Every structure is written in structure tokens, then in C-alpha cells.
Image (spheres, coloured by chain):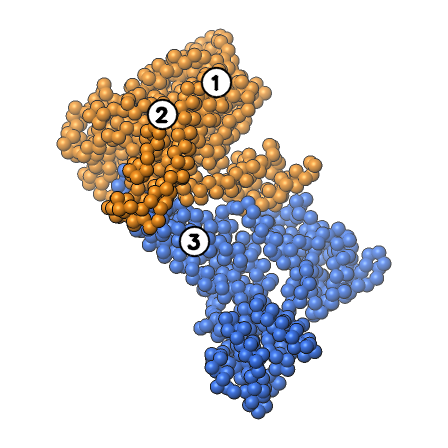
Chain colours: A blue, B orange
Amino acid sequence: MSERGINLANSEFDTIAAISTPAGEGGISIIRISGEQALPIAQVIFKGKSLASVASHTINYGHVIDPISRAEVDEVMASVMLAPKTYTKEDIVEINCHGGLVATNQILQLLLSNGARLAEPGEFTKRAFLNGRIDLSQAEAVMDLIRAKTDKSMKVALNQLDGNLSRLIKQLRQDILDVLAQVEVNIDYPEYDAVEEMTTKLLQEKAAELQQIIKQLLKSAKQGKVLREGLATAIIGRPNVGKSSLLNNLLHEDKAIVTDIAGTTRDVIEDYVNVNGVPLKLIDTAGIRETTDQIEAIGVERSRKAIATADLVLLLLNNNEALTDEDRGLIDDTKDVKRIVILNKTDLPTKLDHAELTDLVDAADIIETSIVNDDGMDQLANRISDLFFGEGIETNSNSVMVTNARHIGLLNQADAALSDVQQGIAAGLPVDLVQIDMTRSWELLGEITGDSYQDELLDQLFSQFCLGK
Amino acid sequence: MEQALPYTGKEYDVIVVGAGHAGSEAALAAARMGNKTLLMTINLDMVAFMPCNPSVGGPAKGIVVRELDALGGQMGRNIDKTYVQMRMLNTGKGPAVRALRAQADKHAYHAEMKHTIENEPNLTLRQGMVDDLIVEDGVCKGVITSTGAHYAAKSVVLTVGTAARGKIIIGELQYESGPNNSQAAMKLTKNLADLGFEIERFKTGTPPRVDGTTIDYSQTEEQPGDEAPNHFSFTTPDSQYLLLKDQLSCWLTYTNESTHKIIRENLDRAPMFSGTIEGVGPRYCPSIEDKIVRFADKPRHQLFLEPEGRKTEEWYVQGLSTSMPEEVQQKILHSIKGLENAELMRPGYAIEYDIVSPYQLKPTLETKLIKNLYTAGQTNGTSGYEEAAGQGMIAGINAGLRALDRGQFTLKRSDAYIGVMIDDLVTKGTTEPYRLLTSRAEYRLILRHDNADLRLTEMGHELGLIDETRFAAFENKQAAVKAELKRLDTIRIKPNDEIDAFLVARGEKPLKDSLLASEFLRRPQVNYADVLKFIAAPAEPLDRQVIEQIEITIKYAGYIKKAEARVERLKKMEAKKIPDRLDYDDIDSLATEARQKLKKIQPETIAQATRISGVNPADIAILSVYIQRGRIAKI
């Protein structure tokens, strides 16, 4: 592939640019430019060394200037990476600026007004894929990597990028192919005695075995979804039970990885927090901050809404007050969702009837805390990770976890196809009909690794990518 | 060598070179479409000759014969008149893979086909060898024979088979020869190479024939034909089916350790292993010496003794294809049970021949290089009479259409096995003699032998190859199927003791509620005749073919629906055409391998491009984007 080299940036692909770090008031922001014109375009706004003359894969100090007004925009480092040894296999310039929304956006705007086009979501990765740098499942893993909210989800994404999922899927496909081959020989050479007749019994066993593995993968997918998208978490309770304190405590604890969704549209700001490796996506944090000023009816209404959309509810009670009807109402409202009842303010005298509470709530779901004193927060964190990962989630280099929605969809279909195989056999259908569903499962698995081509596959896939990488 | 003086022969619309199974169908199709057609063959006594096994049909191949018949081809009708045994294979499996196979009387088969060709208006059959093509400005305008005749034509079909620079090999012996010691055509493929075609060398082989009067049949197992009637052609009535007593049986025997020992001891004399044979042979039909070497653990191999006809005592030893020296062949035969005293009548041989690498063809079987020139059959790298006939039909139709100045005709993979085969050949090429297998078809459940008429008769009719009488009969069948399906979908069956007793006896659950007759028929252990026990019979009794359609349509509806959904998905990609003469060098980001393959094969649709090995999804995406942009640019 190396012969495709520098000429790869071509008329087919114009030069694209985008901010490739999460938007916000972070330390450093990076604006990436990729394509044939990456260097010339960057040069227009860059005051410093001639980017065309520096060695590939070097970082160069300089300033971004507005080429018209000659005004200095920011002090920057410009990384120059020449094709083909770049992420997209095209020429790439990355401008590291001091960050801040205003300066970063201004630099991007300058690039766009000097010949670059704003990259579509996922377009850098799409180019990497189209230029043959990475395969389909790796491309998707990159998307997940960008979205990864905590270290653990990062590990899963990296693992997949290495091709572990691809390897497992390819193995499964090979297994299916072996079985199919035997069925085919029986059909095409009915009088040939050299091959054992592939009975429906053998097919049944194989289908069941494969389905077992796929089900295991799907199980991992559930955890994967949590790792990738964050666990929608509602903090509820009466006014003044400590919701804001809990929120601030959680956010404070993990300030380093609090972030927001990287993307073009940012209508909704959600807060993410990492609790023992579980990324929590806190729902309606604005509401929590406001509730102290709200009249109670509105507060309760908001709580109900939050419960409806939550994967996990953190229900706060005040140890220093007796249970109210409203508390009982919230306990009842959350009885069917995953919840942790936080008995807060244990630093104050106990006025709540513990016996009544344990009648209403499973004792294991009750955590006693004094959030202001930071007491009980470890137990809370442990309870959260226990709830979702049971024995704990291992992402050692051997385990394969499915985290991508498209993969999950395909695995579900393959699972269904394998069920059809077994049903067909149970209904006494001939082997060549049962084989149709077996072949289908083979094709579906192939779509995960991109080994079989489906027309809509790429469009659907790449529209899911977030901006930047 | 003395040369014949040139002279100008008659002008024709279509000339077909070679009168084997491909050439016969091509010439008949072109002529029946109204073209003045010339069919040239090296030897008139070898029209539609079977130089290898005396049988027609089997898995996938049998379906091709039915497809040919639906398009108006001759092979099905011809074998229905000349078979000596008929047998349905894979009866224990589903409807899609059942396969009809006939043992042929190879002499009668040849005579019947020759007679049909002779009596076809518009068609002239002539003995002669074509040495060169007349080509002007990349357009084929006729042929030149060794006798000096220059025949002009609007289009030409080459179906020259193993005669093309054929070389027979028997042990140390080698000589120029076409099949069965006929004259080889030593010039034509050289001419093609000079015109710029890539020519490859393939190899095939045939087993020895033995004298049936010297076979001890008591040492072998009888393989009789079927009692229940079946034919290949839609037009052949059941009343013409041969009674079992009038059919000839085949006989099964096996090789053994001593056979294998003889072969192993003489491997140094086997052209396959001594390096004499350069051509590529088929993996699926190996010679016996190849089997012994590759499957050394197997204690025995099956051999079927097949009659070559009614008026001959020659027997074909299926499974014993070999190019060992004649002396060794005799020893091998005598080591086999039942053949201890068998007299060898003709030795087996290997034959090497030239093929035109099929990537050089369009799906119409016209060559990309030279306009109005078509090739079919073994010339395109296939093996088998049915494969040849299927291509011959398509090449003949298209040569005929071209002569008539009409648009070309192709079959999709979802239309027919013939479509699968041609797409495979022109898209993937072949590295060995290509044989059709049911596993090559992704829409097997749709491409059944029982519905070949439903799939293709209308096309044959439109091409002018199916006459009105036959088409009316076809439409009647279709209507009868439709009417009865509708009837079964309206009649309800109510539970009663009689039905429950019947069901329990069949191992089925008794009825809980009333159900439609169609739902009743869907039960695995219930057939159409059973349904008629509980509902009124249709106004007129139905043909077995109509009943077969009804049973398959109802019983396999779920699977058929799934297969149809897949066909629909593919159709979308088939609709994405790739412009002619697309400059793949202009698409920089294609992988080098993909670019080379795409340039070589020049696929006509995105769907076809996806099937080229070495072209991966990324390349397809790049290609799609490029074409899409081109379209936008044009607007």
C-alpha cells in the first residue's frame, strides 16, 4: 500500500479541518487539517517556519495570524505529518493552540475561509478507512474511543482497535464455513461416500454452540453500552436532603475526567462522572442545582421525569428527619428501577425510623453517608460498580467486549438466525433449508468486520461518527 | 503443407464455430430467432457428441437443463428422447437441491440433435475447420476455413471446446488431437492470441471404456433408475416415461488396496506427476492417480459403471479418469471387483487445450476486445455439457440479437444458474475447468428445477424461442397454481375425530381450532393429497407439476420470502451502473490490487464489482463516491 504515498491526497478528497479536542475551556485545543492542501492552507495563517520545508512528524513553534488584518490570534505549535504515515494517510497539520472557545473557533474559521472545508462527523476516520489504513471494526472502535468516557471504556475501545473482535468474529465465521462446506458437499455430491453425511443433528449442535458464544458477546454488550454511553443517573429527593452536595461531591471527586459530549450540537450539556470505572451521566444537573429555590411541586415533578429516563436512581433521604409521605412516594416510584437509597446526614442525630425504612427498601440498597464530611462515599462508589458489573469488569487483553450499537444489532440478528436454524431442525425441515439460516448468520458476522458489503453500511456507519477524529 | 485457394462463400447472419453442446444450442437459438445461421464442425459425426460421461443433469446441472428448456433450448427435449435411465437425486433433501439426472444413449443423443439441427429452417450444418477470424477495426466480420472459404457474418460464436490445440496424453504417448481422437484445431486460438486475447491452457480427462460382455455384474451393486416419471422438458408428457424394466441400470464397484498399489508403483509413468501435463485440471473431478496421491488414507474409491447406449457394449467407468499408460490402465481395471476379466475397449486419456480467459468477456459473452465475437463452453474455461449448453444458449441469443440489431440479453444471478455461472466466469474468472455447483448460487431456494419454467419461459417467449402453443400451456399451468393456492387460502378445515386420528398417526398434533387448508398443508407431515381427504377436490384434477408448485410454495413460504428479500437487496446494487470505459487510474485512492482487478474485469455494476476478489469494501466505497461525483458533475 505504501506506493499510494503522497499522491494519495487527491481530487477525490478535498482538504478538511475540524477541532479535534472536546470543546470547552480546557488546557490545549487541537485543530486538525487533512488533505492535499493541508500544508498550504495552514501556511496562510501560520507565522513561523515554512511548513513545507520542515521535516515530517515535527512540531513547529509559531503564531496564527489573520492573513488580512495581520492580527495575531494565538501562540501555537504546528505539527506537520506528511502522507502516508498519518492517521488518514493524507498530509495532516495539527495546530495546538492555547484553547478557549473563542481562539480555537477563530483559528478554525480562518482555515475554512482559506480553502479548507469543515469536516463532517467522523470524516477523518472515514478517510482512514477509505484509504485502507484501518478496517471497519477498527474504524468503529475509534469512534468509541473518542466517545469513551472513562479509562475502562478506553481499554475496551483500544482492545477492539487491536482487532480482537475481528479475530473472534473471523474465527466464528470460519467455524460456520466448515459446517456449511460439509452440507454443500452432501448436496452437490449426493452419491459420493467419502464425506460423512452432515446430519441435522450435527448442524443443531454447531448452531447451539455458536449461539452460546454470540449470547456471551451480547451479554458483554450490555456492560459495554454502560461503559460507552454512560449510565443515565438521576439524583432525587426532597429539598435539602443533600442532592446538590452529592452532585458537587461527585463532580469534585473526579474533576479531571468531567467532560461533555464532543460534538457539533451541544444543546444539552450533560455531566459525566467516573465512579469506580462506571461512567455516570447525571441527569438534569441544572434542575438539582435549582431545586432548593423551587416550590416543592415542581421539584417532585422533575424527580418523576428523571426517574423515567434513568438507568440508575440515587434517592436521598434525610437521617435527621422522620420519613415523610413524599419520601415514601419516591421510594414507591423507584421500586422498579435500579436504585441506591442514600441515607444522608448521619453526622446529625438519627430521627428516621430505620426499621420502617428496611421494610420498604432492601437493606443492601441502603448506603449511609454524611456527604459534607465525605463519609460513606466509598461505599456508595462500590455499590454503584457492584450493581452494574457484579463480580467486577475485567478488560484484560484477551477478553472481547462488544460496545458498538451496529455490532450489537448484527449479533442480535445472527443470534436470531441461529435460533431459526434450530427451529428449522426441530420442525423437521431438510438440511439445505436449515443451511440458509446458517449462511445468513455467516453473512451477518461478516458485516461486523466489513467482510461482506452492504450498500447502506458505510453511510450509516460514518454518519454516527462524532466530529474530530 | 499445401494451402487451399481462397474463395468467397455465402453470407450469413450468424456463424457458430463448433457443434458440441454449446454450439448446437447457440446455432439453434440464433436460427430460431430468424437469423440465417451457419454451424461449422470439424466432424459431422460428432455433433452434440459426449466424449466423456454418458449422462445429463445432476445437482445444479439438471437445473441448467430445465432453464435451457424454459428459454427454448434443445438439450432437455433431446435427452428426454434419448435417455436410458432417469433418476431424481437428493430426494431426502429440500426442493431446491433435488436434481434430475439421466443416463444418455450417447449415439442416439448425437443423432437426435444432428437431425434436429438438419431440420431447422435457417440453419446450415457444415463440416469444416475454421482457422482464422475476419476482423476489421476491432469488429468480427466472418471466418476463414482451412478449405479456403471466406464466410461473412454479422456475428460469430466460437464454441471450439477441447479441439483448440488439443493434445491427448496417455502415459508416455502424446499427440495432437481433439476429443475422442478427432482432428485438433491448431490455428484458431493462435489467431485469437494474435488478435490480443489471453489464452490459457487447461486440462481434462476421461476414464477407460470396457466391454460390457466381459463385466461380472454379480460382483457389483445395481443402481436402477426411478419408477416415478420425470422429464427435463416442460413439453415431454409423463406418458412417454420409460418403464423401469425398459431402463438400463448402472453398477457400483470400488477400487481397493491392490488397485492403489498398482497406481503408486507406476506414478513415475503418470503424466500428471512426471511434469508432462502443463494444463490446469479440475479439483472436483480428479484423475484416479490424483485421488490416490491426495487421499492416501482412503482404502477405496467409488466407481460407477455406466452404459454408453443401447446399441453398444461399451461401458464408461465413472471415477477412473486417468492418463496412465494403456498397459497400467489394464492392470488397474483387472484389480477391480467385477472387472477382473474386463476387456479394455478405449483407454482413458488426458487432454490439454486452449481456453480464452473468461474475464475478457462481457456478461453477454461477447468479447470485450472484438465486437460481434462471442465465445461459449469449454472455450470459456468451463467443464460439462450442461455448462456448455447454457453458455451456448446465451451466446447464440446475443449473437442473434446483434445480427437483428436488437439489445442484448443477460441473466442475473437471481434469475438462473446460467446467470450465476456467467457472472462467476466474467467477474471472478476461473483457475480450473469451472463446474456449476449448487453452492455457487446464493439464491438456491429460488433457483429450483421445478420453477425454471416460471422463472424463464416468459423471457424465452419474448426472445421468440417459445412458441405460442407452449406459452399458452405455461400460462395455464401458472393460472392453475394460482387458483388452487387461492382456494386453499379460503377453505377452512374444522377439527373432527377423523382429522385428529389422521394427524396423530402421522406424528402430528391434533387440531385445536379450525384452520385454513393452506395452513394444514404447511404441516411437515401433510401433503396435498392428504389435504384433499378433508376438503373438496378442485373442479379439475391437477397435474403433478401443479401440485408440486403448490406444495413447495406453501411449505417453504418462510424461507422463500427470506431469499426474495435478499434478491431485492441485491437488485439495488445491480441498479448502480458503472460507466463504460471508466478510467480507474483517475481514482487515486483505490488499492493497487483493486485497481488492477477493476481495470482487468471492468464490472458493469457496483454489485458485480463487489464480487471481484481483491476488491474490498473500502474500494467499493471509493468507487461509489467517484461515480456519484461524476454524475453530479455531469448535471
Left or right, B445 with reference to A194: right
Classify 10 Å Cα crowding around label 1: few (below 14), some (14-19), many (20 and above): some
Q: Chain of mark 1?
A: B
Q: Is residue B176 visible?
A: no
Q: What's the amino acid at mark 2? A: Ser
Identify the element where label 2 is drawn. Answer: loop
Q: Amino acid at mark 3?
A: Ala
Residue type at the position of mark 1: Met
Count of labels in the image: 3
Assess whether mark 2 and mark 1 are in contact (beta carbons under 8 angstroms).
no
Q: Give the structural element (helix, strand or loop) at label 1.
A: loop
Residue found 55% across the figure and 49% down from its top:
A457
Question: What residue would you read off at disc 3?
Answer: A416
Mark 2: few, some, or many residues within 10 Å (few <14, many ≥20)?
A: many
Disc marking residue A247: none
At horizontal 70% and vertical 51% (from top left) the residue drawn is A15
Residues at circles 1 and 3 in contact by the CB criterion of under 8 Å:
no
Q: Nearer the viewer, residue A64 or A351?
A: A351
Q: Which of the labelled discs sits on residue B33, or is there none?
A: 1
Subunit ID for the residue under disc 2: B
Q: Chain of mark 3?
A: A
